[in-house]
Image (tube, helix red, strand yellow):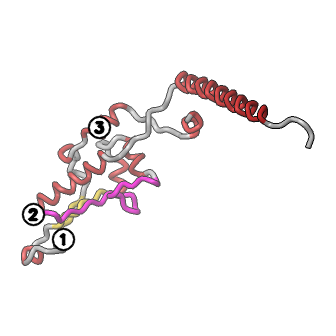
Amino acid sequence: MLRLLKQQVRHQTTLADVQWLKSVSASQIPRQGFTYRFDKSSGPGGQHVNKTNTKATLKMDAKTLRSSTWIPQAVKTQIYKGGSNFPFLTLDQSLLVQSDRFRSQTQNVEDCFERLAVALRQIRLPDRPHSQESIDKWDKIAKKEDKKRLAAKKRLSQKKEGRRAKGEF
């Protein structure tokens, strides 16, 4: 465990970032910065689907996303992380959210923001950095456990050695 603590590079995660992630909702996401596009929905729906543009597509380009202040920096780092499975990040690092769940544009736009909020809440931030005294404490515990483990191994080895027949064959 200690080696993992030392090897991992940790980003500064504050309590405010964690609280923001827990409480983010669709109503808190600012509407400016997104471009809206409406298209015809696919799937069942009869003539309504064929006549109206109800499918909503929201896009925030990469430059606007990077400069946005409504997302904390620690959260942005997790969104851009290579192994991150953030569902709405495109190859060019912009956000793209689509919804055609409802029969009205406004409901689909709100659904897009709700889906984005749910995805943001599912992001896991790295732990806060550990203090040096905490690392020292775990070092001490690890060394003590290693000593106990090696002593038990030595006792078992000596017990088994005592069972062997002594003498030449």
- Specify the label residue 39 is tagged with: 1
Q: Which mark is residue 104?
A: 2
> Residue 34, how many percent across, how many down?
25, 56
Residue 128: % across, % down: 44, 33
Q: CA separation, marks 1 and 2?
A: 11 Å
Who is closer to the viewer here, 20 or 58?
20
Label pair 1/2, CB-CB below 8 angstroms: no
Instruction: Answer yes or no: is residue 25 visible.
Output: yes
Q: Nearer the viewer, mark 1 or mark 2?
A: 2
Image mark count: 3
Residue 107 drawn above or below residue 53: above
Q: Is label 2 in a helix, a strand or a loop? A: loop
Q: Residues within 10 Å of mark 1 (few under 14, many from 20)?
A: some
Q: Which segment is the magenta one?
A: 82-104
Q: Which of the marked residues, 1 or 3, is nearer the chain's N terminus?
A: 3
Q: Earlier in the sequence, mark 3 or mark 2?
A: 3
Which numbered dot is residue 16?
none
**Residue 16 falls in image quadrant:** top left
Q: How would you rate the neighbour count of disc 3 (Cα within 10 Å): few for under 14, some for 14-19, many for 20 or more?
A: some
Sequence order check: which comes first, mark 1 or mark 2? 1
118 lies left or right of 76:
left
Residue in view at x 47 percent, y 38 percent: 11
> Where, quadrant-wise, is the N terminus in this rendering?
top right
* Residue identified by numbered label 3: 20
- Seen in the picture, residue 168 relative to 92 is either above or below; the reply is above
Identify which residue is drawn at 17% across, 74% down.
43
Q: Tell me the kind of residue under disc 3.
A: Trp
Instruction: Return the x and y of residue 66 as percentages of the image width and height.
Output: 37, 49
Measure how far apart labels 3 and 2 are at the Cα level.
30 Å
